[in-house]
Image: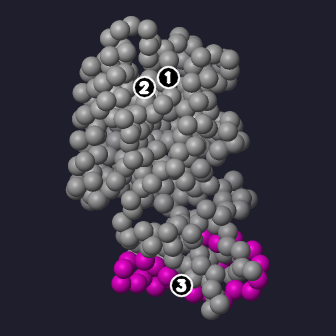
């Protein structure tokens, strides 16, 4: 799963246009996509035709309510595309969390607890380096920095790369940057000069695809549709199809601290000769238990023990078969954030799934 933030502290550079249309284009390549509107302006939500009266749960709840997960809050756009919407209440998150510890990890921790059967997660950020943006960056392993043809944008790219350097030095978090030329009319001489500067400064980071200027983007947003649906034959639609293909063709290498440990976690439960080993990374939990079809969904569940490294663990002796399960974390029933295998449940969500063979 690739988690990509779309961010630039300069406004009007095409972040939301890029996020919404890239999400739609990836879904048309048969990729499972989650788009998170992380901007209090809610423009990504508006771009898909939703108003605040159309939803009750939003990105705000992912930050402030521990028992609300992605699968509770998303809206269906199409079978391959889900949207977590946002409204003006998201602007209250920074003040509400002002005195909280590890507030910059709220979004990342929620994604880890949620069922995430996606190939791509795109996070549309506000035009500022705020707590919301830091949460998105720390939850992501890549960033797309849209750049419009102005020298202010060149300065904004430098500022964003300084921010990424701070995250690397202070948090030990590396993010692969991609720079996207957005809303470019390539005919004027000064635009071509900006393109040359971008190519000289960011050769390895500059995406090949150029998103050309067209009025179709504004028309599509006004209609509450992505441009690939509003006008499939337009230049803008072709540009975003090309961008989606370019991203899917990439081989992205991300340096991750303690790689062996995280690879084990990301593969979910481990089936061994001695039984099935379940591991759970809930560092702030006081109690973690497991329940599932192997114990008739007992409300009490079975306890996990916390190891010295902070990981909760238990071993179960299970016969061959398919088993659905959930963790009970301080009383909240949560899917396994490190297991991509899921099965739909009767409540409209998903349970984690382990296959013993």
Magenta stretch: residue 84 in it?
Answer: no
Q: Which residues are magenta?
A: 297-326
Residue 92 sits in quarter: top left
Label 1 neighbour load within 10 Å: few <14, some 14-19, many 20+: many
Question: Where does residue 339 sit, x and y in percent of width and height?
Answer: 59, 66
The residue nearer to you, when weighing 275 against 327, is 275
Label 3 neighbour load within 10 Å: few <14, some 14-19, many 20+: some
Question: Where does residue 309 sit, x and y in percent of width and height?
Answer: 36, 80
Q: Which residue is mark 1?
A: 211
Above/below status of 153 relative to 23: above
Q: Which residue is mark 3?
A: 314
Question: Where does residue 191 sit, x and y in percent of width and height?
Answer: 36, 14
Above/below status of 323 relative to 120: below
Q: Describe the element under mark 1 as helix, strand or loop.
A: strand
Label 2 neighbour load within 10 Å: few <14, some 14-19, many 20+: many
Q: Which mark is residue 181?
A: 2
Question: Where does residue 141 sit, x and y in percent of width and height?
Answer: 42, 51
Magenta stretch: residue 307 in it?
Answer: yes
Q: Which colour assignment does the render follow?
A: one colour
- Asked if the residue at tag 2 contacts the one at tag 1, i.e. Cβ–Cβ closer than 8 Å, the answer is yes
Looking at the image, which residue is at 37% across and 21% down? 195
- Tell me if I can see residue 132 in this picture: no
């Amino acid at each position: 799963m690739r988690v990509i933030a779309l961010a630039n502290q300069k406004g009007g550079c095409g972040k939301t246009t890029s996020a919404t249309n890239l999400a739609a284009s990836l879904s048309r390549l048969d990729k499972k996509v989650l788009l998170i509107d992380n901007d209090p302006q809610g423009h990504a939500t508006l771009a898909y035709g939703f108003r605040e009266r159309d939803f009750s749960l939003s990105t705000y709840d992912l930050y402030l309510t521990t028992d609300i997960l992605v699968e509770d809050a998303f809206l269906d756009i199409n079978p391959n595309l889900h949207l977590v919407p946002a409204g003006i209440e998201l602007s209250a998150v920074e003040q509400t969390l002002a005195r909280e510890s590890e507030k910059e990890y709220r979004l990342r921790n929620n994604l880890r607890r949620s069922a995430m059967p996606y190939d791509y997660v795109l996070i549309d950020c506000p035009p500022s380096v705020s707590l919301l943006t830091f949460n998105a960056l720390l939850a992501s392993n890549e960033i797309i920095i849209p750049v419009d043809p102005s020298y202010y944008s060149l300065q904004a790219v430098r500022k964003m790369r300084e921010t990424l350097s701070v995250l690397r030095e202070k948090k030990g978090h590396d993010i692969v940057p991609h720079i996207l030329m957005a809303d470019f009319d390539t005919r004027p001489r000064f635009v071509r000069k900006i393109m040359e500067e971008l190519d000289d400064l960011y050769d390895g980071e500059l995406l090949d695809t150029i998103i050309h200027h067209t009025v179709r983007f504004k028309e599509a947003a006004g209609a509450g549709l992505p441009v690939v649906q509003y006008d499939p034959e337009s230049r803008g639609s072709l540009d975003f199809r090309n961008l989606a293909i370019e991203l899917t063709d990439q081989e992205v290498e991300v340096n991750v601290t303690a790689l062996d440990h995280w690879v084990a976690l990301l593969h979910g439960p481990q089936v061994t000769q001695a039984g099935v080993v379940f591991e759970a990374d809930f560092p702030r939990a006081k109690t973690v238990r497991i329940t599932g079809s192997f114990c008739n969904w007992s409300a009490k569940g079975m306890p996990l023990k916390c190891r010295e490294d902070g990981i909760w663990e238990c071993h179960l002796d299970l016969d061959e078969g398919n088993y659905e399960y959930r963790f009970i974390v301080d009383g909240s029933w949560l899917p396994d954030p490190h297991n991509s295998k899921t099965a739909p449940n009767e409540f409209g969500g998903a349970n984690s799934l382990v296959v013993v063979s």
